[in-house]
Image (spheres, rainbow, N blue to C red):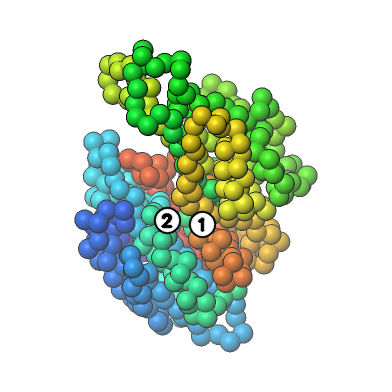
Amino acid sequence: MTEQAIETYLNENKDRFLEELKDFLRIPSVSADPSHDGDTKRCAKWVRDHLLSLGMETVEIHETDGHPIVYAAHCKHDDKPTVLLYGHYDVQPPDPLELWHSQPFDPTVRDGKIFARGATDDKGQVFAHFKGIESLFKTNGELPINLKIVIEGEEEVGSANLERWVSEHVDLLECDSVVISDSSMFAPGVPSITYGLRGLMYCEVTVIGPSHDLHSGLYGGAVPNPINVLSGMIAKLHDENGHVTIPGFYDRVRELEAEERAAFASLPITDEEFLEEVGAANTQGEEGFSTLERVWARPTLDCNGIFGGFMGKGAKTVIPSQATAKISCRLVPDQDPEEVAKQMEEYLREVAPDSVKVEFTVFHGGKPIVVSRDNPTVQAACRALQKSWDAETVFIRSGGSIPVVATFTELLEVPCVLVGLGLSDDRLHSPNEKFDLDNFFHGILTSAYLYAEL
C-alpha cells in the first residue's frame, strides 16, 4: 500500500463516493420522532449492508430497547493494534422546514458543499471513514490493523441504550483506542484533533409560592412572587467577576497548564472574529481567562430557560404560584456532574427564602474528558491529518459534551481520539446543514492514513 495508490483510488471514485453519501443522507433517520422508527431501522440495515460490501468480516445489527446498533469487526492480525471506530446514523429533526433552501432529505450540492440533514452530524463524517476503509481494502487487499465499528442510532436523543449495551459487550469491544469523527476543525484548512471535552450537568429548579395564581393588585407586595424570588436566586449564582459562587464548585477543577494556555493563545482567532461569529457586542465571563480558555477549559453555569406566570400576548396582572428555571453547568476535569448537582441544590435551597418551597430535578449529565496529546493514537492521527491536508495539525478542546466519550473511556479503559472533519459553520442541528466536500474527501484520506499510521 502506498499513499499515492490511495489518492489515485479516491480520485477515480470521487463521483461514486458522493452518490453513495447522498443515498445515506436520503434516509430520514430522525431518532427523536417515533414516526421515523421505520426509517431508523432501514438506515441501520443500510449501514450493515454497506459495511458488508466494504469487506468487513463480521457485521451485525444489535437490537436495543430503542434504535438498533450496528456492530462490525475485521480482526486478522495477532500482532497489530485494534481500533474501535464510533459514529451515529441518527439525525436531528429537520424543523423548521420553511428555512431550508433545499429539501433536508434530498441532498443537494451547491458551491462545493452538500446540504442535507445529517450531512456533517454525523453521516458525512462516518461515511468518510467507510470510504477510507474501502480504499485500504482495495489498494492493500487487507486492513493494516484490527478494526471494530460501532454505529448507533440514538446519539441525538442522548444515547439512552448505548452505555448499557457497551457494558454488556465489553469483551466484544476490547480494543486499544477509540476513534470518533463527530466534531469540527478549528478553521477551514486547519486540521485539528480535539483532545478535551467539557462535561455537563443539566437541572431544573422550581420555586413555589402561593397555592394558586393571585391578582397582583389585591395581593401584590404581601406574598412572595416566585418569579422575583427565582430571579434573585439566579443572580446569586455568579459574582461580579463572573465566578460561580456555589461552595465547592471549583474544588476539583484541573488548572490549565502554561503550555496549553500558550497553545490556545497561538491559534488564529481574535475576540473580534469570535464576536462577529456569535453576533454579540462584547465578550464576558470568568475574569482572568481568555475567550478560548473560557469556552474550552473553564467550568460554566448558565440559565437556559426561565418561565412562569402569564406569557401570552397582552397583559394579565397576576402573581404566579410558581416559576421554573432550567440550568446547565459545563464541567472540566476533574469535576463530577453528580457532585456538582448536589452542590447546586444545596446552595439554591440555602439562598431561597423560607417563604417559598424549592423543587430540584437533575435531568442528565456527562463527565469531562482530556486525552494526553502524547498518546500514540493521538500522534498517529496528528500525522495522518498533516499528510492529508499538507498542513500542521493543531490541538484543540471543545466546550461541548459528547457523553459517549466518557462511556468508552470508563468502560473500555482506552483513550478516545476525536478527529473532527466538520466546520463550525456547518449548521448542525439547524436548517441548511452542510458538509464541505473538500473536507469529505480529505476525511477519506485522513481515515486511510490514520489506520495505516497505527
Residue 309: horizontal and vertical position, in percent? Answer: 36, 26
Q: Amino acid at mark 2?
A: Gly
Front in this rendered view, residue 316 or 79: 316
Residue 124 higher or lower than 293, as above or below:
below
- At 36% from the left and 62% from the top, the residue drawn is 153
**Residue at label 1?**
403
Mark-to-mark CA distance, 1 and 2: 8 Å
| Residue 158 marker | 2
Q: Is residue 8 left or right of residue 336?
A: left
**The C terminus lies in quadrant:** bottom right
Residue 87: horizontal and vertical position, in percent? Answer: 44, 62
The secondary structure type at the circle numbered 2 is loop
Front in this rendered view, residue 167 or 251: 251
Instruction: Give the mark, 1 or 2, whose residue is nearer the N terminus.
Output: 2
Q: Is residue 2 visible?
A: no
Q: Is residue 309 left or right of residue 361?
A: left
The secondary structure type at the circle numbered 1 is helix
- At 57% from the left and 37% from the top, the residue drawn is 348
